[in-house]
Image (spheres, helix red, strand yellow):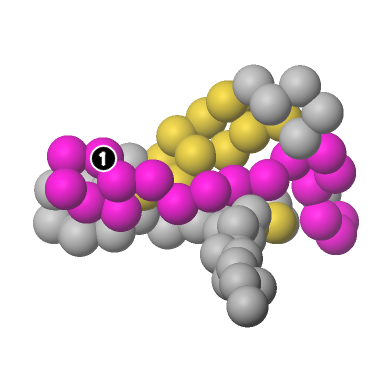
């Protein structure tokens, strides 16, 4: 039984056939490990339990004078 967070893994939201899914990947190698696809009755898949969600990169504002 797992206790706490899954180490060295992260998940990111992906769009699969127009529906939202989640892809789990290894943080050290960047290799994609598993995909959770939504069922036909649902529009979105559930997240992986205990795996941190990656944040999107923030857009930088240019400072032009």
61 is higher (above) or lower (below) than 9:
below
Q: In x, y percent, where is residue 22?
A: 45, 47
Q: Residue at the front extreme?
A: 65
Q: Residue at horizontal 26%, vertical 40%? A: 16
Q: Residue at horizontal 57%, vertical 25%? A: 32
- With 5 as the anchor, is 24 left or right in this view? left
Asked where in the image residue 31 lies, by quadrant, the reply is top right
2 is higher (above) or lower (below) than 55:
above
- With 29 as the anchor, is 20 left or right in this view? left
Q: Residue at horizontal 76%, vertical 35%? A: 27
Residue 60 drawn in magenta: no
Residue 12 drawn in magenta: yes
Is residue 49 visible in this depiction of the protein? no
- With 41 as the anchor, is 46 left or right in this view? right
Asked where in the image residue 53 lies, by quadrant, the reply is bottom right
**Numbered marks: total:** 1
Q: Residue at horizontal 49%, vertical 39%? A: 23
Q: Quadrant of the C terminus?
A: bottom right
Q: In x, y percent, where is residue 13?
A: 45, 52
Q: Secondary structure at mark 1?
A: strand
Q: In x, y percent, where is residue 21?
A: 36, 48
Is residue 59 visible in this depiction of the protein? yes
59 is higher (above) or lower (below) than 19:
below
29 is higher (above) or lower (below) than 13:
above
Query: For this rendering, which residue is in front, 43 or 30?
Result: 30
Residues drawn in magenta: 3-20
Q: Which residue is mark 1?
A: 16
Q: Residue at the bottom extreme?
A: 65
Disc 1 crowd, CA 10 A, few/some/many (<14, 14-19, 20+): some
């Amino acid at each position: 039984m797992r206790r706490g967070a899954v180490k060295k893994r992260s998940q990111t939201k992906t769009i699969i056939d127009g529906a939202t899914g989640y892809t789990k990947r290894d943080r050290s190698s960047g290799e994609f490990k598993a995909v959770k696809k939504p069922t036909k009755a649902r529009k979105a898949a559930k997240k992986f339990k205990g795996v941190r969600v990656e944040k999107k990169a923030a857009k930088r504002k240019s400072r032009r004078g």
